[in-house]
Amino acid sequence: MTYHLRTHTSRLMAGAALALALSAVGAGADTIRFWTTEEQPERLAKQQEMAEQFEAATGTAVEVIPVTESDLGTRATAAFAAGDLPDVIYHTLQYALPWAEAGILDTDAATDVVEELGEGTFASGALSMAAVDGGVASVPVDGWTQMIVYRRDLFDAAGLEAPSSYANVLAAIEALHNPPELYGFVAATKVDENFMSQVLEHVFLANGVSPVDENGFAPLDVAKTTEVLDFYKAIAEASPPGELFWQQSRELYFAGRAAMIIWSPFILDELAGLRDSAPPTINDDPTSRDLAAATGIVTNFSGPSNPDGAAWGDVRYFGITTDADTDAAMEFVKFSMDDGYTQTLSIAPEGKFPVRRGTPDEPNKFQEAWAELPVGVDRKAPLGELYAQEMIDEIVGGLNVAQRWGVAEGQLALASKIINSQAVNRIVRQYIDGEIDAAAAVAAMNDELSSIE
């Protein structure tokens, strides 16, 4: 999806006039309210510290208000009805477009912030996910992309290409699958786990297959979906038997018994022996970094009908509300994405990839700072110390091409209902188990999904 911001006269002066704008904001607004779903005490403390830095710079105080993520939708709707929305909300992707359509978000203000910071400094995928006519619904803050985690040492020894396509994954399985010592893959097969939904959506996206278009439900293409089913059956057959989800994926990979798994980046600190509750067991040292050193990752992944591939991404946003003190809210968001951005990312660096790589003058400023932020639980180390630069680049680069069902089509709500129904999981599992053939599986998915509203 090509993303273009409109060009128009910005609401605030930029460049040399920024200091004047900031002082004007400080004089006109004593306090703004900021809702955040990052409500754990350590994370709240870091956000409070950033709010204090902003107040010192501008004279505007920020009241940091924790909101439980599952309550965010109902609380925002009630506050909107009462004309009492906070000034800024840190929110998930699922709310960006619906809130813009409902009038909760000031999309002009968000677009101005992106323009003033520099559209080209943001990951294009994160912008396109929140695209509205003429701009963006909210300002992208951070995100992460799902990864194929693989034993790069074994791939290199066998002369294999990285698992960036269906074909490369299948070639690696052919070369490396040697159960029970080494499984070629650990696929998600437990149908009532969201993990299977997430993995399957990534595999479908990789081949350019989606159950929705701009008009709503779109019947799955038989040929392309058959390619998806055949691939998923192949990786399931290269997996151990049983009901598999994230736990078995991690345990087998950490034990050196899996060549490939699909996981979130929250595995990165554990992989390097920094978390005692989930240590690598590939050798006798639970703090060993050997497995991390032997690991590669792929974020953008392609199928035969979609050579450009796709990354499955989760992005979070700062929404400026229609009840906000607009100028003050914009300055707070700009501060959080510029002078305070490293602090923003430090809340949880292993799951908060920088969607803004740097500034126009220093294009990699924030990516480099993020790579030096400490991760881990029982021990701490920066990702840049644990992993090679090309792997850091791959981790962050996935956000340029990050996708989700329904986002580009304006059908995220319907796509979410389709995913939550777990019909795709169940029918794919029936196909894997040989209960139905590919044609029957596609027909069953189309039949069930068409009735979801």
Image (cartoon, grey):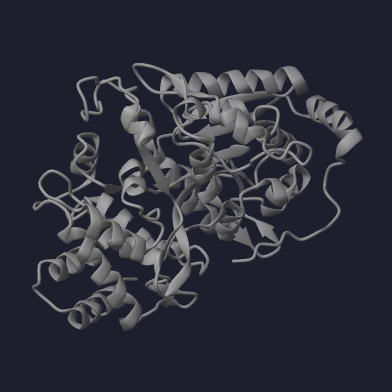
Q: Which residue: 72% across, 50% down?
A: 119
Position in image of residue 279 (x %, y %): 25, 26
Q: Is residue 115 left or right of residue 424?
A: right
- In the image, taking residue 230 as reference, residue 2 lies left or right, namely right
Q: Is residue 306 visible?
A: yes
Instruction: Look at the picture and state if 44 lies above or below 327.
Output: above
- The quadrant holding residue 225 is bottom left
Viewer-proximal residue among 436 and 386: 386
Residue at 54 percent across and 36 percent down: it is 389
Q: Nearer the viewer, residue 69 or 152?
A: 152
Q: Residue furthest right?
A: 16
Residue in view at x 44 percent, y 42 percent:
72
Q: Quadrant of the N terminus?
A: bottom right
Q: Is residue 263 visible?
A: no
The residue located at (25%, 64%) in the rendering is 232
Q: Is residue 402 above or below residue 227?
A: above
**Residue 170 spot, x, y in % from top left:** 28, 62
Res 33 → quadrant: top right
Name the foreground residue: 21 vs 245: 245
User: Count of labels shown?
Assistant: 0
Name the one closer to the observer, 73 or 441. 441
Which quarter of the rendering shows the C terminus? bottom left
Is residue 96 placed above or below 31 in the rendered structure?
A: below
Whole-percent x, y for residue 220 in the image: 34, 78
State the image coordinates of residue 234 (x, y, percent, origin top left): 21, 64
